[in-house]
Amino acid sequence: MSGPGHSEPGRLEPGFSDLAGLPVARRLHWGRWLAAVLIVIALAYLVRAFAKGQIAWDVVAHFLTVPVILSGIWNTVLMAVLAMAVGIVLGIVVAIMRLSSNPVLISVAAGYAWLFRGTPLILQLLLWFNIALVFPVMGIPGIWTGKAVVIMTPFVSALLGLGLNQGAYTSEVIRAGIISVDAGQHDAARAIGMSRLHALRRIVLPQAMKVVLPPLGNEFIGMIKMTSLASVIQYPEVLHNAENIYYANSRVIELLIVAGFWYLLVVSILTPFQMLLERHFSRGTARPGA
């Protein structure tokens, strides 16, 4: 006998029905289908416009691998790597200054970040390229001096402009990474006799890398594209070289497509390396399935 509130196995309580045998009705997501159709139509329109427009694709194919474009790609990657290296070194130094207890260092670091983050990058590039109007002679008095107009080549001006600007942004990224490390790590390092800088180098920064690397990777990819601004000071990166070609043959769209193709290719190659670095530094902390 079954007690109150219990039923025999296989039997249903009064008022209930067995739903196992009923078909399951799928919900139709009309909004998704409509959005997908609209996207396909828009893409088809763009493909048709580029395919049947006045673009000479044979010109695009020809200029993809001409030496002047390939040298421009090399200059773009070289400048991005060097400027990012300068930015990372400056960023670490400025971040440490911002987190120090010295009010002078804090003020200098905050002023640097304020100045270079608050002015357009293209303005900074133009100022460095024309710095000879302010300092005709540069160098170390009594040791070495030279004319600024000779020293500040497009390469040097672009490196200073991009590197100093990147350092201001990188400093905030690194500072955020250092702050994200638990304060107990600092206390433990001091307890075993480590100096502040030693603890920062051996304990804090390695742990901060998993926070710092994703935005730094994005910053580097952005740097690849920001080198195009150096074309205003005649640095021969890929966009500048493409501009020189279309000034001569009037194939503007074709050469812009060539430059865009190479930017996309370089970024597509670098993105997997960024993911590998992130995975390396997040070992032991990654969530299951990540």
Image (cartoon, rainbow, N blue to C red):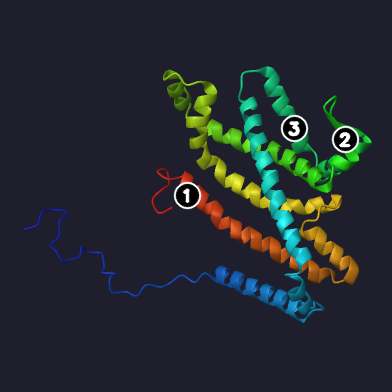
Quarter of image, res 143: top right
State if disc 3 and disc 2 touch (CB < 8 Å): no
Whether residue 130 is visible, yes or no, is: no
Secondary structure found at label 2? strand
Circle 1: element type: helix
**Residue 175 horizontal side relative to residue 113, left or right:** left
| Residue that sits furthest to the left in the current view | 1
Using the image, tell me which numbered label, if any, was put on residue 146. Answer: 2
First-in-chain label (3 vs 1)? 3
Q: How far across and down, in percent of the image, does residue 128 sit?
A: 84, 40
Tell me the residue at 69%/45% (across/down): 82
From the viewer's perspective, is the residue at label 1 or at label 2 nearer?
2
Closer mark to the observer between disc 2 and disc 3: 2
Q: Nearer the viewer, mark 3 or mark 1?
A: 1
**Which residue is rendered at x = 74% and y = 51% of the image?**
226
Residue 120, position as x, y percentages in the image: 80, 43
> Which quarter shows the N terminus?
bottom left
**Disc 3 element:** helix
Q: Residues within 10 Å of mark 2 (few under 14, many from 20)?
A: few
Q: CA distance from mark 3 to mark 1?
A: 33 Å
Label 1 belongs to which residue?
A: 279
Residue 199 horizontal side relative to residue 34, left or right: left
User: What residue did someone put label 3 on?
Assistant: 114
The amino acid type of the residue labelled 1 equals: Arg
Q: Residues within 10 Å of mark 3 (few under 14, many from 20)?
A: few
The extreme front residue here reads 143
Classify 10 Å Cα crowding around label 1: few (below 14), some (14-19), many (20 and above).
Answer: some
What distance separates the C-alpha of mark 2 from that of mark 3? 31 Å
